[in-house]
Amino acid sequence: MKKFRISHNTQFAVLGLSKFGKGLTQALTDNGYHVLCCDIDEQIVQENLHIATHIIQADASDKAVLEKIGISNFDVVIIAFGRDFESAAVTATILKELKVNYIIVKANGIRQKQIFESIGVDRVILPEKEMGERVAYSLITNDLMDSIHRSDKYDIIEMKPLPEWEGKSLDKLRLRQTEAINVIAIIRENEVMAVLDAKTVLLPKDDLIVLKSR
């Protein structure tokens, strides 16, 4: 799975306001990101005008529509058409043709996931599988992560080390004092390092799981 580094300047487009698309858009907007939404149903668009930076009524599986809204200018495009697999597959193909930087799509089952991956989608989400994993993890950790997510004081984010952090240990960086963040885990070469000490050195390819003060 191709990784993409999100920053506060990242521009998102969500195609389709299914329950998944709506929830995703609301969460991104609530966290201060600019989001464009597009849905073919005028009533759905009118009901959700408040959840996105911009929202338009149009057929997002139409190449001419995608070109008109400048879809290739967005950093991340999420296809969230509910159960309309055919339209999602067509749209994914068009987005690849338009050289969209990073494409995410929701799939319903492994077979759809494999087809989307063969098209070249960067990340395929299986909501039920990922929700099951999240519930299992919340049970194992006694809901610690969920409690933090519900907090109005902290956010948990995944990020890459900044260039100036690379090759330096946590005790030298003093990120808690200088950046108001606490590194709680590191994903390195697909392995999770959950026990960190002050001498842990950050590497360029690390993925940091960070607790950040709001």
Image (cartoon, grey):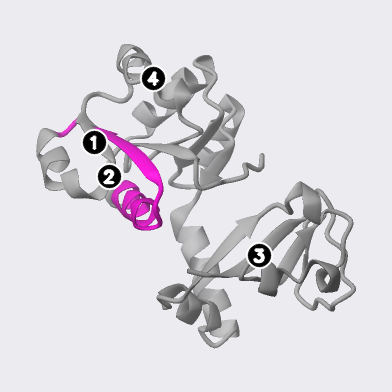
Residue 55's disc number: 1
Disc 4 from disc 1: Cα separation = 14 Å
Q: Is residue 117 magenta?
A: no
The answer to whether mark 4 and mark 2 are in CB contact below 8 A is no
Disc 3 from disc 1: Cα separation = 32 Å
Q: How many marks?
A: 4
Q: Residues within 10 Å of mark 4 (few under 14, many from 20)?
A: few
Residue 52's disc number: 2
**Along the polypeptide, which appears first: circle 4 or circle 1?**
1
**Can residue 110 be seen?**
no
Q: Position of residue 105 (x, y in %)?
A: 46, 39
Secondary element type, mark 4: loop
Which residue has dot 3 on it?
Answer: 209
Disc 4 from disc 3: Cα separation = 33 Å
The answer to whether mark 1 and mark 2 are in CB contact below 8 A is yes
**Along the polypeptide, which appears first: circle 4 or circle 3?**
4
Q: Is residue 63 above or below residue 190?
A: above
Residue 70's disc number: 4
**Along the polypeptide, which appears first: circle 3 or circle 2?**
2
